[in-house]
Amino acid sequence: MVAADILKPFTLSSSAFIHETDIQSQYTCEGKDVSPSLKWENPPAGTKSYVLIMDDPDAPGKTWVHWILFNIPASILALEENIKNLPSGTKEGQNSWEKTGYGGPCPPSGKHRYYFKLYALDTVLALDAGVSKAEIGSAMDGHILAKAELMGYYQKKKI
């Protein structure tokens, strides 16, 4: 490994949209409501698993959680669009609709920001599927090696 490789940042991207641009409607409640493809590069040494959290901090009253995946194996570096078969060992957390699975952007009004946050962990979380974002946050405490972030905007087309 050369010195330049060590300096490359941990990054998260999508072929569906570019960081800080609009998310296409097919990934929202006004479209097919399918998850976008995601890929990441340059995870830190010692990564044992990943946690993915998608949320909307602009939602009225509280941050709205749209999607949580945890215990994504360290060998995985991408998720396909509209993923149905999660990588072996991957579990889903509970979103703000009190269910598991992807729920796309669906802001009640205005343009909202949607963050896809990927955490590289030095452990696999000893949690059951369906846990909350708060429970995952507590379990990750002290185990985060790096964080990569991708943000897109969405505003409903139909009123």
Image (spheres, grey):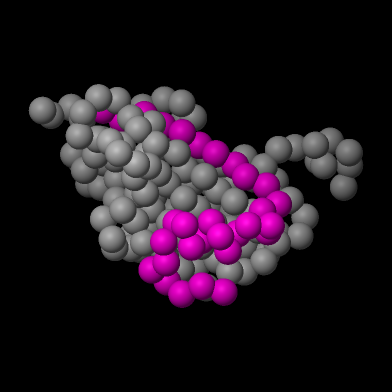
- Residue beneath the point at 48% across and 46% down: 38
- Residue beneath the point at 57% across and 74% down: 126
Q: Quadrant of residue 147?
A: top right
Q: Is residue 135 above or below residue 114?
A: below
Was residue 86 drawn as part of the magenta stretch in this picture?
A: no
Q: Is residue 128 above or below residue 113?
A: below
| Residue 26 located left or right of residue 76 | left
Count of residue discs: 0
Q: Is residue 122 above or below residue 150?
A: below
Give the image location of residue 33, x and y in percent: 25, 47
> Observer-nearest residue: 129 or 78?
129
| Residue 108 located left or right of residue 16 | left
Image quadrant for the C terminus? top left
> Observer-nearest residue: 79 or 89?
89
Give the farthest residue toward the front: 61
Give the image location of residue 35, x and y in percent: 35, 49
Give the image location of residue 8, x and y in percent: 75, 37
- Residue beneath the point at 51% across and 72% down: 127
Q: For residue 73, say whether it is visible.
A: no
Q: Quadrant of residue 16?
A: top left
> Observer-nearest residue: 13 or 153?
153
Highlighted range, magenta: 126-155
Q: For residue 134, say whether it is visible.
A: yes
Give the image location of residue 136, x and y in percent: 51, 61
| Residue 74 located left or right of residue 61 | right
Give the farthest residue toward the left: 159
- Residue beneath the point at 46% across and 50% down: 53
Q: Is residue 56 above or below residue 53?
A: above
